[in-house]
Image (cartoon, rainbow, N blue to C red):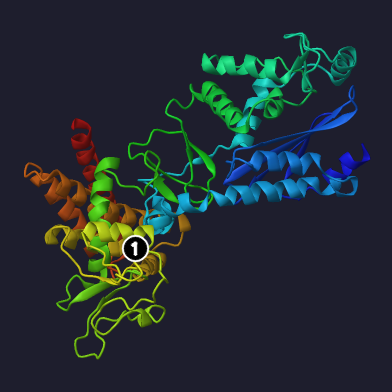
């Protein structure tokens, strides 16, 4: 089995190699920035004198022929190419995963509006930090409950005693994958059936009859018996079973940006969390940006109009000139009627695409695709697309604005969002806070309070607008008072530090009162 060890020598450093027993080794690692996981087992079958290779991954096959191609990659290899097997496997699965990944990612909310997920514009109070909870973290925790207590000599004696090619359950002798169990050698199919039946019946803790070496949990060997997604589900359920007494509200989530598997251990009334790895904040119910007090359905209805309205209003809310939006680069710009070409987009990358009358000066049969984000703006504005009679390519390149959100509501939401999203506003406030507070923890607390206030002003105003009722005048008044209070406080840089602390405490108290008020009304609905 000299080639066997040559393969292990060429395993990249980013993969972890674990010896399950003297004749079986596991190699595990992440692909495509943690979007997929790969586990490969190399097993030496002493009875048949063969090397068995098991490949398990949670990526999807891009075509029906991918499975045959994978088998061909493993079986039809010359001896001199065998040491390079593992790198070729990694490349094959990575390439196949990429094929079906691009179109799905482009249409997701994070890909279209990633600015709303950033840590700098969100609040840790609304979206508290989650904890890492991948397969590795779960295996480490469950090790104490499943690891065998026998000695290494007892394991070797058991292994040497049971050197059979017959399954003790189905009594067949033609099974190639056999595992040492408490009752003898058991084939992979019988072992998988026994374990998945417990999963179907929700029987935990699991009974895993596999015999493993001391210090090795039988859970590690499940990856060679069951598909990787099934093992991940088993781990989550086992982890939740043992953790439920300490964390009854635990929820498993996955970061939409870095795809890190996480868990929320404490109850969060805002249904949002923040990834500790990349800082991405999101609602774990719908995988959109945090939007409390709006429900997921309410926020989707609001975003259909608000995403477009904000693009027009964020820089030109008080402008009296005509404005347009470019369909290619999404730039919103003012029309200068004294110019020779007033309708042309000022972006140099797409300026040549427009004629002097504002029409899209396209090349025949050469179409510039419209992004999913732009299609949302087109639907919101109810703008009909015009197409060339000769080649069928669109001939409209700019969109006219339309009032989608009532102006008084948009005024408040635009100002609150600009305070959070525009970097100069945030940086000015952070510099002033740094002058007053020396400790980083104090600075972070004040900056987070500012984000919390502006987040609540924007989203609470949207909730009141969607409700459309006049019975919540006290809520409107509370939102307006908190908004004005925050705008005044953030510009009072000359105030002594002691007075600033007192006013920040008052602001924090008013913020908590507003959250409590909206909690009462959202729960009552």
Report which residue position mark 1 lands on. Answer: 421
> Would residue 345 be found to the left or right of residue 348 on screen?
left
From this viewpoint, which residue is outermost toward the left?
Answer: 470
Where's residue 408, x and y in %?
12, 60
Q: In the current view of this chain or complex, which residue is farthest to the right?
A: 2
Report how many numbered discs are placed on residues in the image: 1
Quadrant in the picture for the C terminus: top left
Residue positioned most to the front? 390
Residue 14: x %, y % from top left:
71, 49
- Viewer-side residue, 467 vs 191: 191
Tell me: 497 left or right of 173: left
In the picture, measured across the screen, residue 352 lies left or right of residue 175, that is left
Q: Residue at x 24, y 68 (%)?
A: 312
The N terminus, quarter of image = top right
Q: Quadrant of residue 226?
A: top right
Residue 442 vertical placement versus 167 (above, below): below
Q: Residues within 10 Å of mark 1 (few under 14, many from 20)?
A: some
Name the one closer to the observer, 154 or 320.
320
* Residue 41 image position (x, y, % from top left): 76, 34
Residue 391 % position (x, y): 36, 69
């Amino acid at each position: 089995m000299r080639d066997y060890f040559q393969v292990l020598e060429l395993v990249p450093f980013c993969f972890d190699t674990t010896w399950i027993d003297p004749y079986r080794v596991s190699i595990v690692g992440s692909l495509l920035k943690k979007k997929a996981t790969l586990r490969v087992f190399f097993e030496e079958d002493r009875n048949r004198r063969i090397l068995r290779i098991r490949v398990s991954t949670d990526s999807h096959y891009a075509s029906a022929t991918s499975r045959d191609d994978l088998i061909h990659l493993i079986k039809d290899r010359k001896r001199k190419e065998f040491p390079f097997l593992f790198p070729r496997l990694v490349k094959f699965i990575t390439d196949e995963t990429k094929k079906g990944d691009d179109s799905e990612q482009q249409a997701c909310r994070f890909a279209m509006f990633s600015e709303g997920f950033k840590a700098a514009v969100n609040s840790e109070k609304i979206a508290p930090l989650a904890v890492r909870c991948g397969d590795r973290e779960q295996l480490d925790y469950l090790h104490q409950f499943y690891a065998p207590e026998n000695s290494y000599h007892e394991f070797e004696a058991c292994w040497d005693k049971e050197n059979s090619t017959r399954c003790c359950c189905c009594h067949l002798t033609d099974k190639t994958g056999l595992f040492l169990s408490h009752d003898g050698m058991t084939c992979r199919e019988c072992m998988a059936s026994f374990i998945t039946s417990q999963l179907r019946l929700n029987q935990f803790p699991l009974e895993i009859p596999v015999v493993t070496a001391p210090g090795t949990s039988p859970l590690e060997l499940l990856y060679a018996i069951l598909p990787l997604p099934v093992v991940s589900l088993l781990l989550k359920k086992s982890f939740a079973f043992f953790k439920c007494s300490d964390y009854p509200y635990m929820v498993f989530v996955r970061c939409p940006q870095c795809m890190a598997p996480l868990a929320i251990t404490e109850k969060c009334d805002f249904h949002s969390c923040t990834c500790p790895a990349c800082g991405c904040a999101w609602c774990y119910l719908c995988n959109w940006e945090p939007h409390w007090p709006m429900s997921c359905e309410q926020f989707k209805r609001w975003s259909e109009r608000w995403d477009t309205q904000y693009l027009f209003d964020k820089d030109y809310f008080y402008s009296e000139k005509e404005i347009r939006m470019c369909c290619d680069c999404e730039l919103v710009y003012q029309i200068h009627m004294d110019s020779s070409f007033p309708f042309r987009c000022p972006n140099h990358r797409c300026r040549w695409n427009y004629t002097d009358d504002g029409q899209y000066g396209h090349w025949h049969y050469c179409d510039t695709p419209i992004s999913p984000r732009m299609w949302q703006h087109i639907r919101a504005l109810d703008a009909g697309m015009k197409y060339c009679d000769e080649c069928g390519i669109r001939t409209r390149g700019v969109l006219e604005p339309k009032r989608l959100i009532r102006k008084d509501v948009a005024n408040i939401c635009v100002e609150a969002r600009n305070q959070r999203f525009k970097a100069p506003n945030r940086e000015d406030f952070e510099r002033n806070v740094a002058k007053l507070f020396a400790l980083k923890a104090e600075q972070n607390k004040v900056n987070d309070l500012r984000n919390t206030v502006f987040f609540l002003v924007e989203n609470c105003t949207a909730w009141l607008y969607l409700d459309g009722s006049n019975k919540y005048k006290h809520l409107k008044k509370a939102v307006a008072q908190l908004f004005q209070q925050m705008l005044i406080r953030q510009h009072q840089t000359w105030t002594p530090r002691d007075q600033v602390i007192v006013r920040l405490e008052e602001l924090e108290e008013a913020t908590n009162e507003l959250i409590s008020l909206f909690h009462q009304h959202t729960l009552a609905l």
